[in-house]
Image (cartoon, rainbow, N blue to C red):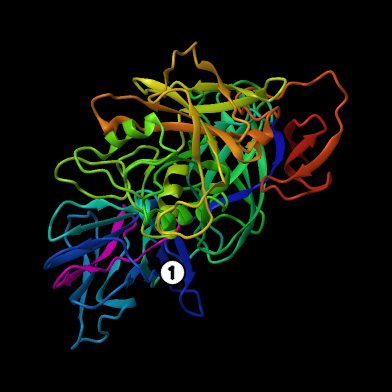
Amino acid sequence: MKKYLLSILTLVFAFGLTVQAADGDGNTVTLGYCNGQASTTATIEESGRGWLECALRLPASALQNYAGCEIQAVRAAIVQRINTDSLVVWVRKELNGENLAEQLIRRSGTTPTIQQGWNEIFFDQPFQIPSEVEDLYIGYSIYQRTGVKIISQVQPPVLNSTYYRFDGSSWKDISGSGVASIEALIGGGTMPDYELGFLSATISPELAVSPTALRVSLTAHNYGLKEITGFRVKASAPGIEAIESDVEASVPVGSTAECEFIFDPGVETNEYTQWTLELVSLKDGEDQSADNNTVNPAFAFQRNALIEEFTTLRCPNCPPVAALLKEVLSQSPYAERVYAIAHHSGYYTDIFTVDADYDYLSFYGTGDPYAPSLMLNRRPNYPYYENKNQKVTNFIPSSEEELKGYLNTELLRGSNVVLGMSLTFNADSTRLTVTVDARKNGNYSTPSPRLNVFLLEDEVLTRDQAGTSGKYYLEHVTRGYNSTWGTSVDWDGKDYSYTYTFDLDGKWNKENMEVVAFIYNYDYSSINNREVDNAVRVKLADSGKDVTGIRPISPTEETLTEVGRYDLSGRPVDKATKGVQVVRFSNGTAKKVVVL
């Protein structure tokens, strides 16, 4: 006997391998991650003469659908051709391996010649994809006569997809800042009509729905030549009744997307439960290969991201970065899952500087502090670079696209701890009590966890911001915090609870205030070992609502009146709309329900 649950699909990050028909009869397709997109700007620049190489990994799970076909050409887009000379496209089994197929073009004297933007280069001897398929790398080597920005990367990013090196140095994974604009042109064989494959998946508790509900983030790819408009997934685990979920969605030819749906096994599970997700059927036709129809999801909580901004009133270059950050944080999913704290230090100090801002200058390592700069989850990985002395966590985003790429990478990582928060005021609203709950899973291994709690205010008026004139509004201003390096987390089994109270100044605008809490590893000796594990935010305007995310919603004795019903994107819906809905009640609480 199987249990059935109709689930909603949400396309959170449309990313990954894309396949597009390249001729009228569908016998040639392009295979890559960029969906034919190229950038007009680049962030990577290597100085001097030498060969710059960029590579894209094509996993075996994607290539197996084209066994027996040929990689006939490589399409590569470059941002600039000035100060370049020769461009070689190639196919390799390993990044440092030999070229299994290659073709050279130059600035002049070849057909075609090197062009800014897309270059489509056919091999004299195409590479045949073997029946025993392994990962392959496609890419290019381009000779530069001096420092020049060449590599085109576009959004969204795909983990472990894009690499580069210069003049024979070690390869660097730059997947976090976007995917390379590189595609393989495949032909010479038969392509499947309907073929859906599962690449990866994660499972996390969805306690706001029920104590046993689970959210699945499933990465699925359409390898076929026809659109897929829906499919059915079976979730099974030893000793648990199998559950089948119908996923209603349009998956165009060649698209890869991370799809989210919720199911409820009705029993408690954890990170030791061995789930298997299996494709049962397609809505439109018959799946032509079962080899890629199953995946074993990893157990992880959803990760939110923390940005820490170094800025001061005396910094004339800070307003543009602050404006970029504000614009990004106004967009979904960053508005819901990325939280920011401003530290008024780095370039002198000002009236908003607090003691912690001085201490956080240690994140600059042995170098001089500066502003503006950002930290993302206190990781020293953004952007990818090599510092011969010491890596630091601070960076300056060069564009909105670059910052989104870093954020997308963080939001996709998952976490082994989840945080929740509730806020309560005293009778005259002069004090705010914050309760933070944390729950870890069995994979959580942070050696010295600490919890920080910050009280922040947005839209703080000033007329003293350098680089501007007249009124200027500051964001994420610190109005209070529990301590510079937080309080030690002492777990009670898998759980931890912490309470802290802030005094509220009557001059502060409570409608513009929020509390951000985060748990991180405190390593006194190393700035490179203080990664933020997860974060949570609650606005003071939402005080009293059930927003903890840790405990399931408890029924109340009072009679509740429904005052609103929304989908997961916040759009109003009616009771007849199928899927997961958020229902808000007259007492300010909310709960998620599944409508069949």
In the rendered image, residue 84 lying in the magenta stretch gets the answer no
Q: Quadrant of the C terminus?
A: top right
Tell me if I can see residue 59 in this picture.
Answer: no
Residue segment shown in magenta? 130-156
- Looking at the image, which residue is at 43% across and 55% down? 319
Quadrant assignment, res 207: top right
Crowding near the residue tagged with mark 1, few <14, some 14–19, many ≥20 C-alpha atoms within 10 Å: some
Please state the horizontal and vertical placement of residue 484, each as a whole percent of the image.
39, 26
Q: Image height check: is 274 above or below 284?
A: above
Q: Compare residues 191 and 75 and report the one nearer the observer.
A: 75
Q: Quadrant of the N terminus?
A: top right
Tell me if I can see residue 526 in this picture.
Answer: yes
Q: Residue furthest top?
A: 492
- Looking at the image, which residue is at 22% across and 43% down? 368
Please state the horizontal and vertical placement of residue 65, each as a whole percent of the image.
43, 58
Please state the horizontal and vertical placement of residue 235, each as a whole percent of the image.
59, 35
Please state the horizontal and vertical placement of residue 261, each as a whole percent of the image.
62, 42
Q: Image height check: is 138 above or below 355?
A: below
Which residue is under mark 1? 37
Please, what is the three-letter code of the amino acid marked with disc 1?
A: Gln
Q: Compare residues 71 and 510 and report the one nearer the observer.
A: 510
- Image check: 216 left or right of 29? right
In the rendered image, residue 142 lying in the magenta stretch gets the answer yes
**Local secondary structure at mark 1:** loop
